[in-house]
Each structure stands twice: as C-alpha cells, then as structure tokens.
Image: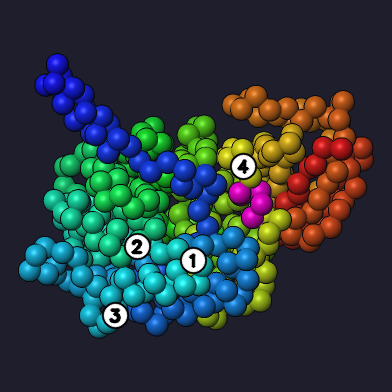
C-alpha cells in the first residue's frame, strides 16, 4: 500500500510538472522585441530607454507590458558551471538588474533563447541545458521566454518544446512561453498544451506583400504572412495564440500600410509585439500603436481569431466576432489607387461558422464605430459608404443596438 501511494505521489508530481503555467496570456500579449530593428546590436541603456518610452509615450497606458530582449544578449560562452551569463560589455549589470529596472516601471521582462545547440546568431543555445537555463530565468525574474529553432539537427520539435515547458514549470516562476519554430512543425496542432503562443511563419519584413530570400530561408511581407497558413484560426484562444510575428509598424512602410498592418494583427488575435525604435518613432506611428479602440479588438475576451469574409474588386473584408454579440470588421484597399466602399448590409449573410456566431441583420441593427478616426458612422440600416486610400483600412466595430 505504501509503495503504491508513493508511486501515485510521484506520478502526480510528474503530471503537475508537465503542465504549462495556466492563467497567463488570457489575451494576446502586448509588448516590444528588439530583433526587427536592432538584431544583436542591443545593450542595457537601449532597453532602459525603451522602458522609459513605454511610460512617456502612453504605450504602457495602452496595454503594452512586455519588453523582450531577442538574440545576442548573452556572452558567447557559458561560465565554468555551464550557466548562461549576460554579455559583460552590453549588459554590465546583468539581467537581474535590468529586470528590476523594467519591473520598477510596472512592466514585464522577457528573454530569448533557442532549442538548438546555438541560437540563430551563434550564441549558446539551451539544448541539454533546459532546466539549468530555466532556473537562471527564474532567478532573474524573467516573465516571458521566446524560444527559437535554429541549430536543432534532427530533434523533434514538439518534444523539444515540451522539455523547456517542463523546465520552466519546475523552476516555479510563471513565464509566458513563446514557441518560435516558424510553423514548420504545425505547432497549432500541439502548441496549446505546451506554450502560450506559437509563430506560424518565418520572419517578417517591412513590406506590404513581398518575399526576400536569404539563401535557404526567406523573410515575408505583411500579406505573405497573412495568407501563408490555412485553417489554423480554430487553434487560437485565451492562453494559446497564433503568433504572426513581431510588428513592423514604424519601420518604413507608409502610414496607411502601418494602419492596415496593425488592424490586421488585431483582427487575427495575434500578439501585438512592436519591433520599431520607440526613441525615434513618429507621432503618427505612436498614434497607430496606442489606438485603444483597435487594441480592444485584439484584446477581446472571447479570443476568437478573425477571418477573411470576402476578397473581390481589390477589396478584402475581414470579420472578428466580439463579446456581447458585437463584431469587428475591416475593409482593406489592396489596390494602388483610392477607392470608394459602398457596402449594402442587406445583401450579406454575415457569420462565423467555426464558432457558431451570426450577425442576424434582418432582426438586429448595429451601430457602426470607425476605430481609427474615433467617430460614429451611423448604423446598419443604411449602406456604409466611405472613401479609402491605397493600402489603407477602414476598421469598424459593430455594436448591437
């Protein structure tokens, strides 16, 4: 009897350990990541400046909270005991001191590593050191881990990410776990039990609809990423999100394209992780990034990922069901010239079959709210008529009367 009880206790312990931290990322995480703009050219002062800008520019007030250091924060070699250490030149006071500074601003701190023997930029990876590294992150009060997929050889992706999930749980500090294996191993099929978000594509690049080759891999423009995966929206929900990569808002596209990019990531319930230099961001960029009405669509508690409703005449229309039988809707001008939208509500049967949601316009009227211009546009009893510039977006919320 005692032996059987002992075995049950061991099995219970293993079961507890093999769960991801629950209660985290109930809505898509909002934050900033260093990679898109700075790659490995990062340092302590830069990160402190970014934290300061979160507060100064109203980003914290808008809901952004994670500041994540990507590849290149660590020294080129582990210490004599096999521990990861911060690059002594870039981060002379170490990760714990930097985390303390970020936490003092009411923000959260994230780090990067990789499931392989080395990171993508050639720094020490976590393969074979998962539990040791997880203990380090816990001791530094890390809140978020982005876990990449370079130099992994023939190891199994799901198994590798489960190992780090279990290591984080064993370290006993709740950490949001961001799976970053680029969608190559269909993480939307297994990621829910392993992490809180998972990348669904390779790396993003700051263009509307392009592919930029790098030899054996490519970077992808906004619409290439949006169109890359099919039938994955049902995998998203509170605590488990399809991640369409860090945003390129403010990194060289037009203001209209930035608005569309931001609107689409919000419609897709993707994490909103900024990738620009906040120290030099334009007023229009900050205006887009801090738009609370758009962010509220991304943060809707239903956690339903939006979907394409129609795509004709150079216009894409996307839908996203919201709480209280409300809806978000975006109209995107895909052409290079201005256009006029004339949408007749009576001619469309609007619904989401995956989630069993219907708008039922025959028996209900909805008020129309323009989320970027912060104004009301009447209701669904009349056609919606609006002018839309090239690559720009009309994003509305339909609130049931």
Question: What's the mark number on residue 93?
Answer: 3
Q: What separation in Å lies between label 3 and label 1 (alpha carbons)?
A: 19 Å
Q: Are marks 3 and 1 in contact (CB under 8 Å)?
A: no
Q: Residue at the spot x=42%, y=75% of the render?
A: 101
Dot 1: within a 10 Å radius of its alpha carbon, few (fewer than 14), some, or many (20 or more) residues?
many
Which of the two labelled residues, at mark 4 and mark 2, occupies the earlier sequence position? 2
Q: Are marks 1 and 2 in contact (CB under 8 Å)?
A: no
Q: Tell me if 236 is positioned left or right of 175 in this view.
A: right
- Please state the extent of the stretch shown in magenta in the rendering: 295-299
Which of the two labelled residues, at mark 4 and mark 3, occupies the earlier sequence position? 3
Q: Are marks 4 and 1 in contact (CB under 8 Å)?
A: no
Magenta-drawn stretch contains 298: yes
Which of the two labelled residues, at mark 4 and mark 1, occupies the earlier sequence position? 1
Q: Residue at the spot x=81%, y=50% of the render?
A: 369
Where is mark 4, residue-wise? 301
Viewer-side residue, 387 vs 275:
275
Viewer-side residue, 266 vs 202:
266
Where is mark 2, residue-wise? 141
């Amino acid at each position: 009897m005692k032996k059987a009880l002992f075995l049950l206790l061991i099995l219970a312990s293993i079961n507890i350990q093999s769960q991801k931290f629950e209660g985290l990322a109930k809505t898509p995480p909002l934050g900033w990541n260093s990679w898109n703009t700075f790659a490995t050219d990062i340092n302590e002062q830069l990160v402190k400046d970014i934290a300061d800008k979160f507060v100064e520019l109203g980003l914290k007030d808008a809901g952004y909270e994670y500041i994540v250091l990507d590849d290149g924060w660590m020294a080129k070699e582990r210490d004599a005991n096999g521990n990861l250490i911060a690059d002594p030149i870039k981060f002379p006071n170490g990760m714990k001191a930097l985390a303390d500074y970020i936490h003092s601003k009411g923000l959260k701190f994230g780090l990067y590593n990789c499931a392989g023997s080395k990171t993508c930029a050639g720094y020490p990876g976590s393969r074979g050191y998962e539990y040791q590294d997880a203990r380090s992150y816990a001791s530094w009060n890390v809140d978020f881990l982005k876990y990449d997929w370079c130099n992994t050889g023939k190891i199994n992706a799901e198994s590798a990410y489960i190992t780090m999930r279990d290591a984080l749980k064993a370290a006993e500090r709740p950490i949001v776990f961001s799976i970053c294996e680029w969608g190559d191993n269909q993480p939307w099929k297994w990621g829910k039990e392993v992490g809180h978000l998972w990348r669904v594509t390779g790396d993003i690049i700051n263009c509307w609809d392009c592919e930029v080759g790098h030899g054996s891999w490519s970077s992808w423009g906004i619409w290439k990423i949006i169109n890359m995966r099919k039938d994955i929206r049902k995998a998203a929900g509170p605590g488990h999100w399809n991640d369409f990569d860090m945003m390129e808002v403010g990194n060289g596209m037009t203001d209209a394209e930035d608005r569309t990019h931001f609107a689409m990531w919000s419609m897709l319930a993707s994490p909103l992780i900024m990738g620009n230099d906040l120290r030099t961001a334009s007023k229009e960029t900050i205006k887009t990034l801090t738009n609370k009405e758009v962010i509220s669509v991304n943060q809707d508690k239903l956690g339903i990922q939006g979907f394409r409703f129609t795509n004709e005449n150079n216009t894409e229309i996307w839908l996203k069901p919201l709480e209280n039988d409300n809806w978000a809707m975006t109209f995107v001008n895909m052409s290079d010239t201005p256009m006029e939208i004339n949408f007749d509500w009576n001619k469309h049967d609007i619904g989401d079959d995956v989630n069993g949601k219907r708008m039922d316009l025959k028996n209900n009227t909805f008020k129309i709210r323009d989320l970027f211009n912060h104004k009301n546009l009447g209701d669904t009893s009349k056609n919606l008529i609006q002018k839309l510039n090239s690559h720009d977006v009309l994003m509305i919320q339909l609130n049931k009367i």
